[in-house]
Image (tube, coloured by chain):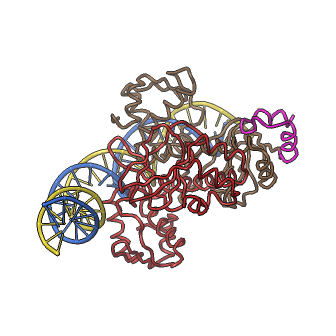
Chain colours: A brown, B red, C blue, D yellow
Amino acid sequence: MIIEELEKISLFQGLTREHYAELGKIVVDRQLQRGQFIFYEGDDAAGFYVVISGRVKIYKLSFEGKEQILHILGQGEPFAEVAVFSGTVYPANAMALEKSRIFFFAKDAFVRLIGQNPSLSMNMLATLSLRLKQFTHMIEALSLKEVPGRLAAYLLLLSRQNESNKSVKLNVTKTQLASLLGTIPETLSRILTRMNKQQFIESRGAAITLLDLDGLNDLANGLRKL
Amino acid sequence: MIIEELEKISLFQGLTREHYAELGKIVVDRQLQRGQFIFYEGDDAAGFYVVISGRVKIYKLSFEGKEQILHILGQGEPFAEVAVFSGTVYPANAMALEKSRIFFFAKDAFVRLIGQNPSLSMNMLATLSLRLKQFTHMIEALSLKEVPGRLAAYLLLLSRQNESNKSVKLNVTKTQLASLLGTIPETLSRILTRMNKQQFIESRGAAITLLDLDGLNDLANGLRKL
DNA sequence: CGCTGCGTTGAGCTTCTTCAACGATCGTGG
DNA sequence: CCACGATCGTTGAAGAAGCTCAACGCAGCG
């Protein structure tokens, strides 16, 4: 049961049967309620996690309580890997967005495994690099784009992933989307309204149809304003 | 000459004599003028670099020309490592801030080395993790802190590094600092003035004395406003 | 059935940017 | 070595973008 789940995790692709067995020995299987905390920023970092089912958010909080979501992770995605290789505490908070199942891997046991398995370490390097790239885009968006541009970029990203090009279904609440885009629900709501009025999109609840891909692209690149 | 430089690079600590020789074979030694470009965002990523002397900035540009500096790198620090493990193009621009010397390592040759050397791969994992943590702080700052808070956090960071606790010397121009903090020179200048007037700091050019560490800490954490 | 969280809208305000002007400084070529 | 241009840094006035606060409808869930 556990081994089967391990084999589905892309981070663990290319491992030998023995290594799966090793992983199986050190893994801790956890069930989470919706809204349950996994760790808080500053907690001692004992290891990292992989989402088996459900969804998890990684986020920071300001003193006033404003939230910035760094990631929303789904099936097969690892999180808190940073804790394994650098630093002794988690640099952000983690919470289950829905009923979820996650695997925990203790730091030291995992480091031993990775030292013996070049393929595992290459996978981990690729994972970390990917995250760095994502953060690069997030920093760019926060610093160089206004909220309409960030939203447009996000919608286009979704449409590229979904393949059903012009129709997109938000997989997070609008409040969470606001937090992911570095803004607040009120602002997001207003901008969605404006995008509707100006025929960039047509949104009904979580279902959004992209009416003007070129226009959205211009918004995302700062070539046009709302 | 080259081998000696390689031995000083912390990313390469713990390697055998043979591996240094290998690295020496694949390294490309480059001299850069102040202001010289190293690569542009979107360029084909052939490998990564290490700064031997001088300083290099990694940055993004908006369509309107506003710049966000992601990193400023000095002696011994690697950059563009992401290019090696994920993606085919550089995700940002790189330019020498001063006369600099850098080493270039081609992607494929380096990947071969890393596959054979667990110590090298652990070093690389640690490096990437550190960068991720730095980016986490940057995202937090951009999204959750106002400019005075970002500046206070930056000054405190410098003072912690320098050990000469309360006296800090900016190692970048104020224009660059503004870009690093996600703002513009005018705003930074105004805030420095206010911090002076309110006795948080005393600044003369690039030399800044931190007069009220607790106050700066409060600013950095959003407990107090300027 | 009531409660809680989500989403929307309006009014007012804060923060930051833009645009403009100007002095200081730095580096370079004459 | 000086003079010049370019960059850097500062300050003011005006404007834009986004946030806060408040109110309210709505849906989902216990």
Q: Image quarter for residue B100?
A: bottom left
Left or right placement of residue B184 versus residue D29 in this view: left
Q: Is residue A122 above or below residue A90?
A: above
Image label count: 0
Instruction: Give x and y (percent) for residue A159.
Output: 52, 26
Which quadrant does the N terminus of chain B fall into? bottom right
Q: Is residue A186 magenta?
A: no
Q: Residue at x 56, y 53 (%)?
A: B136
Q: Residue at x 42, y 78 (%)?
A: B209
Left or right placement of residue B37 versus residue A3 in this view: left
Instruction: Give x and y (percent) for residue A117.
Output: 78, 44
Q: Is residue B121 above or below residue C8?
A: below
Q: Is residue A4 magenta?
A: yes
The front one of A73 and B198 is: A73
Look at the magenta stretch and give its main secondary structure: helix
Q: Is residue B215 above or below residue B68?
A: below
The front one of C23 and B50 is: B50
Which quadrant does the C terminus of chain B fall into? bottom left
Instruction: Give x and y (percent) for residue A36.
Output: 72, 47
Instruction: Give x and y (percent) for residue A45.
Output: 72, 57
Q: Residue at x 44, y 79 (%)?
A: B211
The front one of B105 and B95 is: B105
Q: Image quarter for residue B83?
A: top right
Magenta-tinted stretch: A1-28
Left or right placement of residue B59 versus residue A62 in this view: left
Q: Is residue A56 above or below residue B49?
A: above
